[in-house]
Image: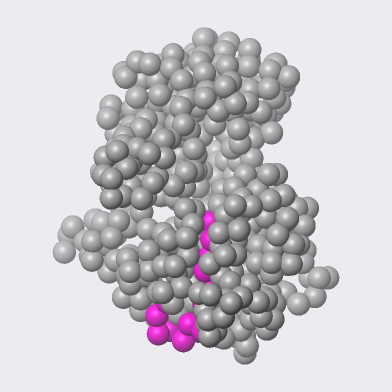
């Protein structure tokens, strides 16, 4: 049986680490390569790098970050942000990422998912979606709407329908990011995550709202997620990867534990 | 010096980076004569069996790998490199290298339901971290402790005809071979180059491996 994965997301702007809170007021908190290495050594299962660089002039900086991460971090990682074409995707994969993460560009051009999936395989294509709660309507029966451009543009598209369509087009995994929960640290959007996990057969990664290890437990059980994304919990040093994993393993989830952690536990 | 066989496999660079990180000298080659002279060979892989075999044949690397295996060169296969050392793969109905008897078969999505009808169908590809259990001691797996996990991404798995060629198994809707080998040949279905410290250690063990 597969272990539940703990994934961390590093937002990168102009080669530096940033953590967005409700997609505004981003503040710089350090070097993404150093952070990635620190989490890798703590036993993180996977990483996501999201390029929020505003100017396309600075895109090359991101490829440099990707290749430096690949030289030091020996777990899988994906890269997203600003990937609009198969060529953009190819560049980050060649720089050393395992997977590409597409979001707004895929909503505007769903063919991108199909093309990337055909070129690199479904396992290399992660569809990331930003979702906001709205009153249910004919167009949005689930009451969960897809928004793009960092949460600014509602698309009139139902999140459940979009997840199914993304899977059909060849996405190998789906990241469900709740804009309502993002940055609140009050827990993941359990209903949204579960609705999507039940609608598709590819792995679902929950994102937005994780503030305590209990939140991860809830979304990995009740929310039916295969993986949970954590950001500020780790970035501000409130928890280590090991502490989160110890908690989840202690509550009976199948979690990858590094030897060191297991030895320490046995010694207790 | 470890020689990485280049047949357009996706993870070649990742394996090279892991070896460089460990301070193990390596070279990449697509030349069958360089492969024939290699001290040790890593045969990586991502992608489809059919495409992999056709590139190997085009480049004459299939014959070089067979000769290297026959003369005792230590060889490590990874992922597709673990599947196409068998005789046949169900993927693209491909005739493979046949270094070991057996075939590569696809996970059945109905397996888990036959075991437990309430369980949802198996997600394919099998992608993520899973525990690897050693079934037969091997120098490349000497560091493993019960419960150690590796990173897998695959829809097919190797099934050697002779169970004595299986060294480790994993469980995904039932047990399947995760590490196979014979004599100077060893191959793992998981991506050891992306499996953190336990994975890097396996590469280190391969570098240190002396065949008695």
Q: Is residue B155 above or below residue A53?
A: above
Q: Where, quadrant-wise, is the C terminus of chain A in this rendering?
A: bottom left
When asked about the image quadrant of residue B33, the answer is top right
Instruction: State the image quarter where residue A245 is shown.
Output: bottom left
Most common SS among magenta residues: loop
Magenta stretch: give its range: A173-188
Q: Please provide percent x and percent y for residue A90.
A: 73, 51
Looking at the picture, tell me which residue is in the foreground, A39 or A127. A127
Q: Is residue B121 left or right of residue A160?
A: left
Relative side of B211 to A53, left or right: left
Q: Residue at x 50, y 47 (%)?
A: B194
Whether residue A210 is visible:
no
At x 36% / y 20%, what residue is drawn? B165
Q: Position of residue A239 (x, y in %)?
A: 37, 76
Colour setup of the view: one colour
Q: Residue at x 41, y 49 (%)?
A: B129
Q: Left of B132 or right of it: where is B201?
A: right
């Amino acid at each position: 049986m597969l272990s539940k994965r703990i994934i961390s997301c590093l937002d990168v702007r102009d080669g530096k680490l940033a953590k967005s809170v409700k997609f505004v007021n981003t503040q710089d908190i350090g070097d993404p390569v150093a952070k990635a290495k620190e989490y890798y050594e703590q036993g993180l299962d996977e990483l996501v790098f999201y390029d929020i660089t505003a100017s396309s002039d600075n895109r090359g900086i991101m490829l440099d970050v990707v290749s430096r991460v690949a030289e030091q971090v020996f777990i899988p990682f994906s890269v997203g942000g600003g990937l609009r074409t198969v060529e953009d995707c190819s560049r980050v994969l060649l720089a050393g990422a395992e997977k590409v993460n597409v979001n707004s560009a895929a909503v505007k051009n769903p063919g991108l998912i199909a093309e990337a999936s055909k070129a690199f395989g479904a396992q290399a294509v992660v569809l990331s979606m930003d979702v906001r709660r709205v009153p249910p309507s004919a167009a949005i029966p689930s009451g969960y709407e897809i928004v793009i451009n960092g949460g600014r543009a509602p698309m009139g598209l139902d999140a459940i329908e979009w997840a199914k369509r993304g899977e059909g087009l060849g996405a190998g995994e789906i990241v469900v990011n709740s804009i309502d929960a993002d940055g609140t640290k009050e827990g993941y959007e359990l209903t949204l995550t579960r609705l999507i996990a039940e609608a598709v057969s590819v792995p679902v990664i929950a994102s937005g709202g994780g503030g305590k290890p209990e939140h991860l437990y809830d979304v990995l059980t009740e929310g039916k997620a295969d993986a949970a994304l954590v950001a500020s919990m780790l970035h501000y040093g409130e928890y280590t990867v090991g502490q989160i994993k110890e908690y989840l393993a202690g509550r009976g989830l199948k979690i990858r534990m590094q030897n060191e952690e297991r030895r320490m536990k046995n010694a207790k | 010096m470890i020689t990485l066989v280049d047949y357009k496999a996706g993870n070649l660079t990742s394996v090279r980076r892991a070896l460089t990180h460990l301070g193990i000298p390596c070279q990449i080659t697509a030349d069958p004569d360089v492969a024939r002279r290699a001290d040790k060979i890593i045969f990586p892989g991502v992608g489809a069996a059919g495409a992999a075999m056709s590139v190997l044949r085009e480049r004459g690397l299939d014959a070089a790998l067979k000769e290297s295996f026959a003369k005792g060169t230590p060889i490590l296969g990874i992922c597709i490199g673990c599947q196409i050392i068998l005789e046949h793969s169900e993927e693209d109905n491909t005739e493979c290298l046949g270094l070991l008897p057996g075939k590569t078969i696809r996970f059945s999505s109905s397996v888990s339901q036959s075991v437990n009808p309430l369980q949802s169908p198996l997600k394919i590809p099998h992608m993520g971290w899973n525990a690897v259990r050693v079934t037969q001691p091997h120098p490349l797996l000497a560091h493993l402790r019960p419960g150690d996990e590796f990173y897998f991404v695959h829809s097919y798995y190797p099934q050697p005809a002779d169970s004595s060629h299986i060294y480790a198994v994993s469980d995904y809707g039932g047990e399947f071979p995760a590490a196979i080998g014979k004599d100077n040949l060893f191959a793992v279905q998981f991506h050891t180059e992306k499996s953190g410290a336990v994975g890097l250690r396996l590469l280190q063990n391969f570098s240190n491996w002396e065949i008695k």
